[in-house]
Image: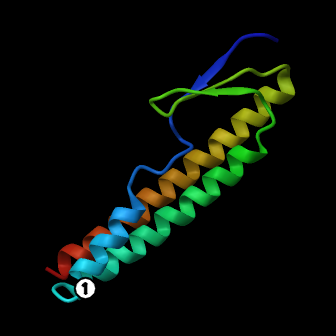
Amino acid sequence: MSAAVTVDDVWRVHGDWKAMREAAVRLREERRATADALRRSAALLRHGQELLGAILDRVDVPMTLHDDGRLTFYPADAADLESLRRAELAAREIQAALSTILARHRATADHGR
């Protein structure tokens, strides 16, 4: 099988956890609830990125990373395609969980204002 497979950018979290952590330090004095939510969000994004990286590390299929974050995989056979399907499904599940939890963090931060 020689067809290339390109998937959306599901291998990186969409958020800057380092900037969130720095913002949390600045806001701690002013807005404790907001700072706590930012710190939890930063930790969550960092952990999510670690999980996504671990999934991607286990994909044993040649790939190319594009500047926009998309990956093109070059599966050799049906087993590679199935491996990619499972990895992408797991990555999307992590992204969905991150979105849900981050929405709760935002609600907590907004309530603290």
> What is the residue that sits farthest to the top in this orientation?
2
State the image coordinates of residue 83 (x, y, percent, origin top left). Answer: 78, 36
- How many callouts does the rendering have? 1
Residue 21 lies, with reference to residue 89, above or below; the image says: below
* Viewer-closest of 22 and 48: 22
Which corner quadrant holds the C terminus? bottom left
Q: Is residue 99 left or right of residue 111?
A: right
Which corner quadrant holds the N terminus? top right
Residue at x 70% of width, y 34% of height: 85
State the image coordinates of residue 95 (x, y, percent, origin top left). Answer: 50, 51
Residue at mark 1: 28
Q: Is residue 69 left or right of residue 21?
A: right
Q: Describe the element under mark 1 as helix, strand or loop.
A: loop
Residue 77 lies, with reference to residue 18, above or below; the image says: above
Quadrant of the rendered structure where residue 27 is?
A: bottom left
Query: How packed is label 1: few (under 14 Cα within 10 Å), some, or many (20 or more)?
Result: some
Amino acid type, callout 1: Arg
Residue at x 52% of width, y 47% of height: 12
